Amino acid sequence: MEKYLLYINGQFRESSDGGTFKAVNPASGEVIAEIAKATVEDTRAAVDAARNAFDSGIWSELPREERSRIIKQIVDKINENARHLTGLEVADSGSTLKKAGEDVFLSAKSLNHYSKMALLDLNEEVEGLSKPGVSKNIVRREPVGVCALIIPWNFPLKMAIWKLGPALAAGCTVILKPAMETSVTAMELARLIDQTDMPKGVVNIICGPGSSIGTELTSNPKVDKVAFTGSTEVGKTIMKSAAGNLKKITLECGGKSANIVLDDADLETAVDGAIYAGFYHQGQCCEGGTRLLVHEKIYEPFVNLLKEKIERMKIGDPMDKTTNVGPVVNESQFNSVMDYIRIGKEEGAEVLTGGKRYGEKGYYIEPTVFINATNDMRISQEEIFGPVVTLIKFRDDDEAVKIANDSVFGLGGAVWSGDDARALRLAERLRTGTVWINEYHLLSDRAPFGGYKQSGIGREFGLDGLKEYTEAKHIHIDEIKDRTKKTWYAVVVPQDNGS
Ligand code: NAP
Ligand code: MG
């Protein structure tokens, strides 16, 4: 069986107490690899490595072209090993082959984009306080320093890249901690990075429990920033833990996004879109369209077609190219989703389709839609993170906006309509970080992604995303050579009053 070791300071090592854990395939329950489980001591070693690498300037002071070249080497390694990485991602996470293939492709594409962003000179000269010729003002964007990157299990490789890319492009050094549930592709990434010219200690990758090594990473005073993707609950814990040395934090947390179907939407497209929005990767997407708001005028035909189409979806082996729905990631997630299905029924919502376990082996759940639901129910307010969509009827655009915004989250959402102008007006009123019009899930390397309200702090992607890994420094160069003309001259130098 494959064994993965911790990657610290450019070396692969066993954990300090020899501990390991097993990577399990959720479709079969089979153990696919053994992984070294980092201790707090290992975590400190990884932080020290990243700190020393940062302080030495070995990465932050490299010419931009050189940083870009080395990041590009990682891109090439991912592309060369795409098939292997895809297979591992399917086996470790229950992603369907199609989703995992896409994830690997998009990881390489995204990192390639960051290799180009590494070339950007973000420093600029801005106008001074008063007249020209008084001062020159430079705003520099410098790397924030040592970054702890903590990621979840739903898009393992992609999330790793979304954090590594901008951190490395900005000149930071990092400690990446994948979710224990899905650590395999991150450890493969360590092997690939080790084959490039990346200086030792710049990238450290360690696996282990968030409760111990995650806490060490977020509280260690040698860490300058924490970039986290995961649940809102853990995000709040991290904010507290990071307060000790006032670390910079970016949090990409949960969501309960409204997917709004207007009465003038193309029915067939909107139904397909609703299925894609709600059930892609078994609904284990933070931005998923889990509250499906449907205009009352098209409610009947929409619901009928939705049920028919969902019931034609193929549930099964994620390695089968024709599979639409794979298993959820593990037993505890399975139990938690099944619990929410029970809660929905108890709250008085009605199951339109699904609602049950599928088969006897593996953590499969039928894609489930609740109807006759209201927005105050727990199944409308809480993140379920599984194949469960709550469908709510609305009367007009104002009511749709009101329901959509009645949430503690604000991550994604969509509007399906035949009228772009109407959809855009509605999109502008949603308190959420991303809105798609007649689309879902698609993110752009060039546009920011992140959450309003309790969906997060800060943004990923685009210039906003890169700047999150920088500190802004203002350098004021005074150009007044005659000291008596300094604005403060009269304040500090005793003046002869002439008497
Ligand atoms: P999670 O339980 O919050 O865990 C996320 C990561 O944090 C894991 O690596 C976990 O480690 C670690 N962690 C747990 N407790 C920690 C602590 N006290 N200190 C530091 N790190 C800690 O989330 P998940 O269950 O893996 O993922 C699902 C959640 O992620 C959902 O809420 C979803 O909405 C959110 N998500 C958000 C986005 C976004 O971009 N907004 C994207 C994807 C997912 P271990 O699990 O290994 O112990
Ligand atoms: Mg696994």
Image (spheres, rainbow, N blue to C red):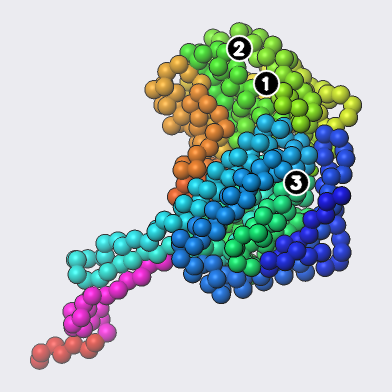
Task: Check the image and report above or below for 91 versus 202.
Answer: above
The reply, left or right, for residue 3 in relation to residue 152 is: right
> Which of the two discs, 3 and 2, sits closer to the camera?
3
Task: Check the image and report above or below for 40 versus 29.
Answer: below
Real-space Cα separation, disc 3 to disc 1, in angstroms:
34 Å
Q: Report the residue at 61% width, 8% height from top.
A: 301
Q: Earlier in the sequence, mark 2 or mark 1?
A: 2
User: Three-letter amino acid code at disc 1?
Assistant: Ala
Task: Check the image and report above or below for 88 versus 218.
Answer: above
Q: Earlier in the sequence, mark 3 or mark 2?
A: 3
Q: Report the residue at 62% width, 73% height from top.
A: 52
Is residue 352 visible from the viewing direction of this image?
no
Q: Report the residue at 87% width, 38% height from top.
A: 29
Q: What residue range appears in magenta?
A: 469-492
Residue 319 screen position, x and y as percent: 76, 31
Residue under numbered circle 2: 302
Residue 454 screen position, x and y as percent: 59, 44
Q: Which mark is residue 373?
A: 1
The reply, left or right, for residue 165 in relation to residue 369 is: left
Instruction: Respond yes or no on whether mark 3 lies under 8 Å from ligand 2.
Output: yes
Q: Does the segment drawn in magenta span residue 483?
A: yes
